[in-house]
Image: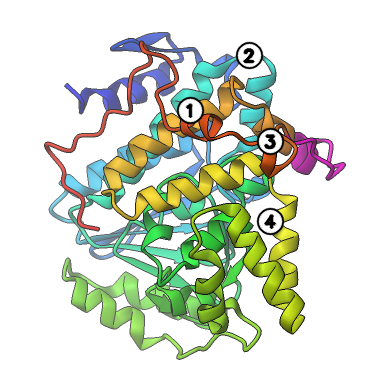
Amino acid sequence: MRLCKYALIRRWILSGEKISYGSRRFASLSSNPLIDDSHNLVLVEGKASSRTAILNRPASLNALNTSMVARLQELYKNWEEDPGVGFVAVKGGGRAFSAGGDIVALYNLMKEGNLEECKQFFWTIYSFIYFLGTYMKPHVALLNGITMGGGAGVSIPGTFRLATDKTIFATPETLIGFHPDAGASFYLSHLPGYMGEYLALTGEKLNGAEMLSCGLATHFSPIAKLHLVEKQLGKLATDDPSVIESSLGNQGDTVHPDQTSAVHRINLLDKCFSHDTVEEIIECLEMEAAKTNDTWCVSTLKKLKEAAPLSLKVSLKSIREGRFQTLDQCLTREYRMSLQGICGRITGDFREGVRAKLVEKDFNPKWDPPSLEHVSEDMVDQYFTPLFAYEPELELPTNQREAFI
């Protein structure tokens, strides 16, 4: 029954008709800015024994909308079932891999009170992320350029991730009043030490060398050699991960993060971000900044003070829970959290953050609650509960597909 959902979504996207799946009802194409009915959102390159999906919204930095992700789902499912396809790759068109979900479109839908299409976007992308995390064939993500939020979600669960000297990674959701989602609570929580908490709370950027160092990337190549990497991959006729790994490594470089990188401050980072509460993390950073005047401590504090206070507490709890959960459990929980984030029952921070940072661009969001001391434990806990008793949970085919990560 669960697998039928993908066919329904495809029919809905292609026809624009109203259909239902269980208790969930989807509106037509014309009313949803997250849906683009163009057939060129995801391009395809066919090679000897591989297929490459190309995210193709370059003017929007390949921001993901519902039809892009549904198209990826359709393609990947067909390729998984095709014995002639040995492995699958994905890359971005233009200067970005993907800047994440199309949150401006989400903002517009929230302004209209049209939450059903927002829910359907999260349902579609989280379902695809689980599909990628359980994919039966080797997967290569070429993460050249901006790779943030949902862009990381549709790539990191795969087998291989190649970063370049132009890659910029971040999960900046707390800075717009949201929480790191799209599987972030799973993969961030499995980084060395408390690097995941640091990245989730601050939204700090990592470059390609830093991604390789902490395990977010499996390989690195200078952008000048990326065409050689792709050329060599295109010649492979294999489904053997070790052969693909060797091919990726042939054009790779040994790189090390700059001395100013947080990677070189892992002991200090762990000391500060291992605390149980956001208040204790900030207090520890303030003490270290006062003792040493360390510029990293100062800049980290600045980031934390820019973020939405409720988002900080929600995100910390999310990462901590992610350490003890499987990928499907993290996605199911994040789905609940995301619905809470868009519905406005607890706070309007997400809508306000997008307005201030991306729409009106006054860069002066009015967070609610305005400070950490105004964030109650009940507010945080409410994020982790279903939106309504009748709201369906995210359905993942865990009895048919088991995650490998």
Q: Looking at the image, is mark 2 or mark 3 earlier in the sequence?
A: 2
Q: Looking at the image, is mark 4 or mark 3 earlier in the sequence?
A: 4
Q: Which residue is mark 2?
A: 113
Tags 3 and 1 in contact by the CB under 8 Å rule? no
Relative depth, front residue between 171 and 143: 171
Q: Which residue is mark 4?
A: 304
Q: Position of residue 171 (x, y in %)?
A: 56, 54
The quadrant in which residue 120 appears is top left
Q: Position of residue 4 (x, y in %)?
A: 22, 23
Please give the name of the residue rendered at 64% of the width and 27% of the height, measured from the top-left corner: 347
Bounds of the magenta segment:
355-367
Label 2: how many Cα within 10 Å (few below 14, some 14–19, many 20+):
few
Task: Point out the frontmost of discs 2 and 3.
Answer: 3
Relative depth, front residue between 344 and 29: 344
Which amino acid lies under the numbered mark 1 shown in the image of this protein? Gln
Task: Point out the frontmost of discs 3 and 1.
Answer: 3
Which amino acid lies under the numbered mark 3 shown in the image of this protein? His
Q: Which mark is residue 356?
A: none
Q: Looking at the image, is mark 2 or mark 1 earlier in the sequence?
A: 2
- Is 359 included in the stretch rendered in magenta? yes
Give left or right: position of 13 versus 397: right
Most extreme residue toward the right is: 362
Task: Point out the frontmost of discs 4 and 2.
Answer: 4
Please give the name of the residue rendered at 46% of the width and 46% of the height, measured from the top-left corner: 317
